[in-house]
């Protein structure tokens, strides 16, 4: 009790505080050394804090000051000073008093302008202007501005772009690129050389959405199950996949697509579709038996934040969870400001069992919920009535009594009333998404060193300061939710946001060309890849926004360029100077994704079941592949063949047991937002593609089809090439096949064709 | 502060390694590996004895006080309630009284290492074992526990230790998988393939399931009705057509690599089949591995196949003892005593036979062995009056042996009852750091750039346990 300083004698900075700090702190946090980037010998630095991003001292609030927390040993894992005698109780009291009185520091300015941070000038942190389209010496090659940007860079080196691909090659390239399926023979025959028309036609097909939705599912870490021990199926989650397919097919403006996923429940015109879209937040893995529930809550929020930051903004903001980002100008305050945006979200569940929710407009949902309440009330009342009449306690029914009651109730007028209510207000379909249950959100704190049990200062919802000179408004609270996600969504989907449009046009570019203009599609920060064509990506971003954020218009622009139409021909001199083809002197080779390889095989064999949408399917799986599962008997119930012969986007994405053929062909990480598919070539791929059941079945059907559709070996070989490779065999190829067929079977020949490099690598 | 991914990083991540380009060039000229095979052998960070590793994973979590952590105090307090400070029990399971081990501990070998009667065969190698008695982990659930022991993280989607080692060292034999996993016939571990996944790295680094039947690898054999001659003819045709296609695109290494992958697959068919063919083993070998005893036959086969895989240059082998649920694994909730007699009985003799053979062939000096489960078990019984033990993540035992390991010692200690590691505590990440170190890899340098930063198996933790090192 002697610790309190003598009344009236306020803690004097020069006499008491500075000598104490100098003795205990300045050695590591002073002019010479700044451990954890923290400096305590200047007031402004003290208030700014070190790499934790949290002020060491909050004037007037000793309880919120990290300095006090650490010197007083509140946190046993972090006590300051780390060596030598600890501060005495009197010394701690002195510091508290000084802080509570305002942490006055005579002679020091209240704030000092932060040192100019060169990272703030990073290109991607500033909204793109629309660069002028450069002039080129060869004007004839330029079909649209994309070509001008690409060609001007090539001309600067004295280079020429590769020759145009042949019509045949370009036809197959465009079919596979846009629909993920090769052209049929009828389509090959009908084609008259108009690629503009072809692009329009392909983009209008449902198969476009089935291919391009899968690209987006990579970004949003889509999975049908939760992973971990039980790996439970996420109820109704496949409707999110269908929502994405529909969105691509209807050319939903990308800004709207963003808003629906982030805040579909908060939009003024919220409906069944937009509620399904908010399933976005709930797609990640989920451990229903977490090691530490408090940490788990923040892990789940981190999953949503990380997907949002990387997926929409190309930012590795999740690195700022425990300390300021080591490389990017992103702070823990930025991180937790964004956590605050999502902090109202809850996972509908009953213990470990996840629940779905009705979908519709809010008016429909309210009516439906009201109906359910009424029905429950009617039935409760009827039960009570019956129990009273029968003289039994409704809460302690025996099995027989319960049965008798159920039978009796079925005959009572109450069920007629229930039926009437159900006629009046129809059932609603259900969906899988997180929900906010209140317009107010509990306070969000910066977590010291990322620990859920160590709350630091409270933060308001915000977006990373480096991207917004003024914070957007989050004041959209309605009666149901806080409206914070709507605030974030509107900001992300706005023209003012420097990243959103650039990030998506870059992704689209990458999905067409194999590499993005920025090769790190999820990282546009200072650590990210430098754009190969900075002016082009900016021009495209602005053009994209000017054209209503329409992805189909963007595709059409790209497909219409001569850049896209280049052949993949090599050039030794260019390759020596630019081995990675950064300047786009040709179209690069790239293997089809796993799904497109499987889908193409089905299309060629004639067995592709074109049914769109619906619940996932279990394809046939090698029973040996189940051996590693903890529950081999139950885990996989394959569908009958016709029902399973759908496009691979409809295959179940089961996190503990991925379809081996997809997995070995480099399906993406499903736990985090995937920037890009890998391409590897290893023996187990060849084993599955050459020996495996799926490809051998398709080879068999392919052969049967050839026998049906053509007579004689020569005609069948011709037809096989046209179906699989959209071209006629060359003389040497025809000869080789004919020779092979003298002893080999047509099935064997078909197996070889489905395994050709050219089958997986379009020209 | 500006740290850029360099071309060197790029080559390393795509398979080149430190001396990447030159080495790759050399190997390509030898025709040993394809031009861009991401599994090409790579030099370690520093010279190390261990070239390969075997992880004997005792799935379900063995009890430390019944195996390698002798606790006389437990006998003294047998039947009394635990009054210590630790949270006991997982998932709301009932907590019983302290329960002594029914197994006798004896000093073994010259070192006098204390090992229980559960392991009469492994005990003969006591002077080779380095037991860590002070292991601890962050989770009490099997799913996240197995994930953490295998990948360093309780979260899904991180690469497993075998994948990291394969990424770091490549493999010497392209005709066999670099990282082989053999599960228990009763089922795989909880989380299945998440335990041997390559996570965010290319799938080429993931563990490949190897079975004991005639077709140990998925789709290893040609489809029914296709004989070897037809298979070869078809592959020849494929090769011919692909090579003609490549001729016009000679600089496309990806296309060349894909051609080669079919040839490797064909060789794999022979090599892998040879590994599982145990028909020519002598009666003495069969006896030593317990192949003719129902109890030991399965794990015995796995250990014998492991020896052959190691001889053929496979980099990392992981064997699972126990699979499916609860008592089919080491998860002795109901009756830990009977459970451990069964699972130790199944594995003890085969493991000893493997060690004996590794010593006889000289592979011992290049091979690292690691034994243990995802956590330990409580010194208390689970509920009153039944001999089960619940999960204990505060303290448990594992052992290492073989290349680079100082045997005949026990490191660290749990408290007097065996609940929690108290002396020289070793976190799972420390174990991973040590495992990599023994293989010549620095866990702070073995990184993979993903999600904006250099990922490590040890995250931001991990200290090499120096005492382990010979």
Image (tube, rainbow, N blue to C red):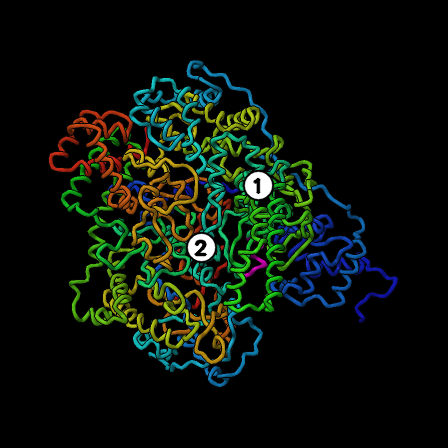
Q: Position of residue A741 (x, y in %)?
A: 14, 34
Dot 2: what SS? loop
Label 1 and label 2: CA atoms lie apart by: 28 Å
Please state the extent of the stretch shown in magenta in the rendering: A292-299
Along the viewing direction, whichever of B89 and A28 lies nearer the viewer: B89
Query: In the rendered image, which residue does mark 1 sit on?
Result: A360
Q: Position of residue A164 (x, y in %)?
A: 35, 20
Q: Residue furthest bottom?
A: B76
Q: Which of the labelled discs sits on residue B467, or is there none?
A: none
Residue at the spot x=39%, y=75% of the render? B67
Along the viewing direction, whichever of B80 and A21 lies nearer the viewer: B80
Up/down of A45 relative to A121, above or below: below
Q: Quadrant of residue B196?
A: bottom left
User: If you read the primary sequence from the N terminus, does the residue marked by circle 1 or circle 2 appear first?
Assistant: 2
Dot 1: what SS? loop
Q: Chain of mark 2?
A: A
Query: In the rendered image, which residue does mark 2 sit on?
Result: A231
Along the viewing direction, whichever of B304 and B17 lies nearer the viewer: B304
Q: Residues within 10 Å of mark 2 (few under 14, many from 20)?
A: many
A270 horizontally vs B260: left or right: right
């Amino acid at each position: 009790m002697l610790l309190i300083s003598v009344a009236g004698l306020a803690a004097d900075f020069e006499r008491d505080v500075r000598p104490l700090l100098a003795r205990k702190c300045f050695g590591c946090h002073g002019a010479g050394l700044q451990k954890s980037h923290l400096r305590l010998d200047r007031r402004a630095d003290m208030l700014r804090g070190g790499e934790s991003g949290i002020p060491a001292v909050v004037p007037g609030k000793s309880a919120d000051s990290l300095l006090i927390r650490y010197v007083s040993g509140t946190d046993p894992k972090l006590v300051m000073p780390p060596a030598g005698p600890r501060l005495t109780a009197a010394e701690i009291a002195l510091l508290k008093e000084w802080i509570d009185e305002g942490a006055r520091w005579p002679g020091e300015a209240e704030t000092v302008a932060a040192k100019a941070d060169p990272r703030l000038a990073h290109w991607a942190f500033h909204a793109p202007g629309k660069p002028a389209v450069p002039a080129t010496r060869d004007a004839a090659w330029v079909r649209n501005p994309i070509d001008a940007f690409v060609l001007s860079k090539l001309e600067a080196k004295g280079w020429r772009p590769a020759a145009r691909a042949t019509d045949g090659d370009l036809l197959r390239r465009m079919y596979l690129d846009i629909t993920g399926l090769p052209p049929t023979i009828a389509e090959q025959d009908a084609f008259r050389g108009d690629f503009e028309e072809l692009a329009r036609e392909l983009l209008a097909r449902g198969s476009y959405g089935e291919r391009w939705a899968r690209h987006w599912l990579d970004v949003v870490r889509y999975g049908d199950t939760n992973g971990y021990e039980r790996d439970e199926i996420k109820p109704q989650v496949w409707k999110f996949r269908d929502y994405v397919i529909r969105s691509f097919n209807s050319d939903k403006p990308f800004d709207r697509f963003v808003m629906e996923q982030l805040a579909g429940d908060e939009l003024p015109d919220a409906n069944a579709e937009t509620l399904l879209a908010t399933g976005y937040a709930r797609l990640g893995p989920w451990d229903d038996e977490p090691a530490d529930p408090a940490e788990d809550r923040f892990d789940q929020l981190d999953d949503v934040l990380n997907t949002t930051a990387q997926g929409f903004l190309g930012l590795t903001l999740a690195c700022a969870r425990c300390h300021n980002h080591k490389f990017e100008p992103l702070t823990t305050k930025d991180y937790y400001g964004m956590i605050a945006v999502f902090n109202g979200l809850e996972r509908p569940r009953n213990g470990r069992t996840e629940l779905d929710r009705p979908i519709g407009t809010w008016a429909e949902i309210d009516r439906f919920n009201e109906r359910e309440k009424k029905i429950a009330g009617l039935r409760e009342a009827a039960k009570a009535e019956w129990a009273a009449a029968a003289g039994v306690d409704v809460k302690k029914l025996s099995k027989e009594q319960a049965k008798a009651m159920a039978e009796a109730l079925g005959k009572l007028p109450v069920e007629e009333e229930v039926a009437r209510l159900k006629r009046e207000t129809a059932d609603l379909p259900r969906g899988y998404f997180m929900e906010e249950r209140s317009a107010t959100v509990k306070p969000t704190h910066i977590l010291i060193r990322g620990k859920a049990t160590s709350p630091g200062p409270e933060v308001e919802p915000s977006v990373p300061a480096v991207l917004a000179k003024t914070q957007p408004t989050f004041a959209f609270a309605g009666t149901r939710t806080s409206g914070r996600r709507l605030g974030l969504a509107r900001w992300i989907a706005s023209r003012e946001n420097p990243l959103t449009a650039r990030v998506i046009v870059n992704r689209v570019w990458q999905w067409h060309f194999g590499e993005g203009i920025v090769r790190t599609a999820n990282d546009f920060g200072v650590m990210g890849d430098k754009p190969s064509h900075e002016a082009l990506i900016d021009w495209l971003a602005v053009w994209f926004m000017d054209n209503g954020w329409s992805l189909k218009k963007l595709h059409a622009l790209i497909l219409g360029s001569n850049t896209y139409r280049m052949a993949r021909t090599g050039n030794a001199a260019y390759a020596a100077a630019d081995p990675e083809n950064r300047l786009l002197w040709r179209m690069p080779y790239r293997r089809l994704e796993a799904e497109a390889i499987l889908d193409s095989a089905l299309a060629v064999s004639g067995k592709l079941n074109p049914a769109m949408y619906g619940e996932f399917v279990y394809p046939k799986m090698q029973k040996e592949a189940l051996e590693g599962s903890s529950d081999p008997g139950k885990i996989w119930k394959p569908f009958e063949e016709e029902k399973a012969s759908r496009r691979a986007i409809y295959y179940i994405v089961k996190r503990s047991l991925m379809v081996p053929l997809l997995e070995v062909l480099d399906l993406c990480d499903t736990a985090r937002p995937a920037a890009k598919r890998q391409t590897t070539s290893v023996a187990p791929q060849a084993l599955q593609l050459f020996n495996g059941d799926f490809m051998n079945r398709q080879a068999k059907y392919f052969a049967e089809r050839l026998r049906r559709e053509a007579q004689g070996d020569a005609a069948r070989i011709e037809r096989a090439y046209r179906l699989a490779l959209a071209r006629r065999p060359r003389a040497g190829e025809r000869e080789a096949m004919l020779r092979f067929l003298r002893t080999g079977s047509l099935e064997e020949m078909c197996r070889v064709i489905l395994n050709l490099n050219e089958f997986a690598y379009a020209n | 502060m500006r740290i850029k991914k360099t071309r060197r990083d790029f080559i390393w991540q795509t398979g080149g390694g430190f001396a990447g380009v030159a080495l790759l060039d050399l190997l390509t000229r030898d025709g040993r590996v394809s031009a861009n095979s991401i599994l090409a052998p790579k030099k370690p960070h520093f010279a190390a004895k261990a070239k390969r590793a075997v992880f004997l994973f005792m799935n379900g979590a063995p009890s430390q006080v019944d195996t390698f952590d002798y606790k006389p105090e437990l006998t003294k307090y047998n039947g009394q309630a635990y009054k210590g400070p630790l949270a006991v029990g997982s998932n709301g399971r009932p907590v019983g009284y302290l329960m002594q081990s029914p197994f006798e501990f004896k000093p073994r070998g010259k070192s006098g290492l204390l090992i229980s009667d559960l392991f009469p065969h492994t005990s003969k190698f006591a002077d080779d074992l380095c037991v860590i008695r002070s292991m601890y982990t962050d989770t009490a659930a099997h799913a996240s526990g197995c994930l953490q022991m295998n990948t360093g993280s309780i979260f899904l989607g991180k690469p497993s230790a075998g994948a990291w080692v394969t990424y770091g060292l490549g493999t010497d034999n392209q005709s066999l998988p670099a990282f082989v996993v053999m599960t228990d016939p009763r089922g795989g571990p909880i989380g299945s393939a998440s335990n041997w996944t390559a996570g965010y790295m290319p799938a080429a680094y993931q563990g490949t399931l190897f079975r004991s039947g005639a077709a140990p690898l998925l789709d290893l054999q040609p489809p029914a009705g296709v004989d070897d001659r037809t298979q070869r003819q078809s592959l020849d045709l494929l090769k011919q057509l692909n090579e003609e296609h490549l001729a016009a695109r000679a600089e496309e290494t990806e296309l060349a690599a894909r051609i080669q992958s079919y040839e490797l697959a064909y060789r794999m068919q022979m090599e892998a089949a040879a590994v599982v063919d145990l028909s020519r083993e002598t009666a003495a070998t069969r006896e030593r591995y317990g192949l003719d005893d129902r109890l030991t036959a399965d794990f015995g086969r796995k250990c014998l196949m492991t020896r052959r895989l190691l001889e053929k240059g496979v980099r990392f082998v992981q064997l699972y003892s126990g699979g499916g649920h609860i008592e089919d694994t080491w998860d002795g909730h109901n009756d830990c005593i009977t459970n451990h007699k069964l699972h130790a009985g199944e594995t003890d003799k085969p493991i000893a036979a493997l060690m004996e053979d590794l010593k006889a062939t000289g592979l011992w000096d290049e091979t690292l062995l690691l034994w243990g489960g995802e956590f330990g078990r409580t010194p208390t019984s689970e509920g009153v009056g039944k001999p089960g033990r619940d999960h204990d993540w505060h303290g448990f035992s594992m052992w290492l042996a073989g290349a680079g390991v100082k045997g005949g010692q026990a490191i660290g200690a749990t408290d007097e009852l065996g609940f929690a590691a108290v002396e020289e505590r070793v976190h799972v990440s420390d174990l991973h750091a040590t495992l990599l170190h023994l293989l010549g890899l620095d866990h702070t340098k073995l990184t993979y750039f993903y999600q904006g930063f250099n990922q490590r198996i040890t995250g931001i933790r991990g200290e090499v346990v120096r005492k382990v090192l010979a």
